[in-house]
Amino acid sequence: DTVLTQSPALAVSPGERVTISCRASESVSTLMHWYQQKPGQQPTLLIYLASNLESGVPARFSGSGSGTDFTLTIDPVEADDTATYYCQQSWNDPWTFGGGTKLELK
Amino acid sequence: QVQLKESGPGLVQPSQTLSLTCTVSGFSLTSNSVHWVRQPPGKGLEWVGAIWSGGSTDYNSALKSRLSISRDTSKSQVFLKMNSLQTEDTAIYFCTRSGYYSGGGFAYWGQGTLVTVSS
């Protein structure tokens, strides 16, 4: 199975730029997607196919990467961005999620 | 609009079988895949499995031997059955669907149903 590795946690100050990384154990082409999940809620899609912004998502969010290395960038970070962020691949079967990165604001 | 709603027992005894239903609206199961994703309390997301538009299925490697996903297209329902439940299967179970444009990114989610495995 394709293992997706994310850093467990990050802490940044409002107004800063933050990058959240996701490394795949094998190539997933550009079939990588990013989600935001707040406590008690279902995940919401932020970025699909590595770099496409989901409708309704602020342009502060962007994604990049291909193959095995992917990045979600938030610039600038706002207080409301406190959440856990997950990557997910749909290139290799079975589909898999990363372990999540918990973003905290200082 | 696209909607998915999970339903199920809430509490299941260890070693018993879990049966969940995902009732969908706003789209056809014969044109779209539906996936199950679960999340143990305080932990991350885990892809459980999927039923594709043609009716074939794929499963999480670690759950494959205990898992079955099926559907009733006339009722717009997808079913998850998992046997030999253990406490580690305690989780919120979501059903979800990708958008036509999103290449496997899950654009639509149900609200989830909490399943607790306990005697």
Image (cartoon, rainbow, N blue to C red):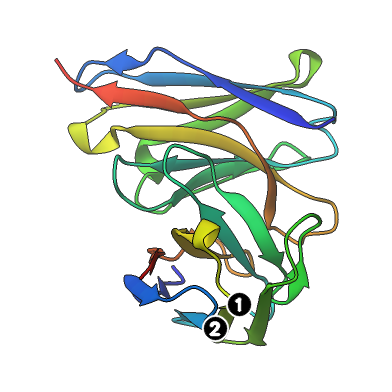
**Camera-nearest residue between B34 and A11:** A11
**Badge 2: few (under 14), some or many (20 or more) residues near its Cα, within 10 Å?**
some
C-alpha gap between disc 2 and disc 1: 5 Å
Q: Which x, y percent locates residue B53?
A: 78, 40
Say above or below: A22 vs A34. below
Q: Which x, y percent locates residue B4?
A: 68, 28
Residue type, mark 2 in image? Arg
Quadrant of the rendered image containing residue B102: bottom right
Question: Which type of secondary structure does the marked residue at label 2 adopt?
Answer: loop
Marks 2/1 same chain: yes
Are the residues flagged by discs 2 and 1 in contact, CB closer than 8 Å? yes
Q: Residue at x 75, y 70 (%)?
A: A59
User: Disc 1: which chain?
Assistant: A
User: Disc 2: which chain?
Assistant: A
**Camera-nearest residue between A68 and A78:** A78
Q: Residue at x 30, y 15 (%)?
A: B11
Residue type, mark 1 in image? Pro
Give the residue pinned by disc 1. Answer: A76
Give the residue pinned by disc 2. Answer: A17
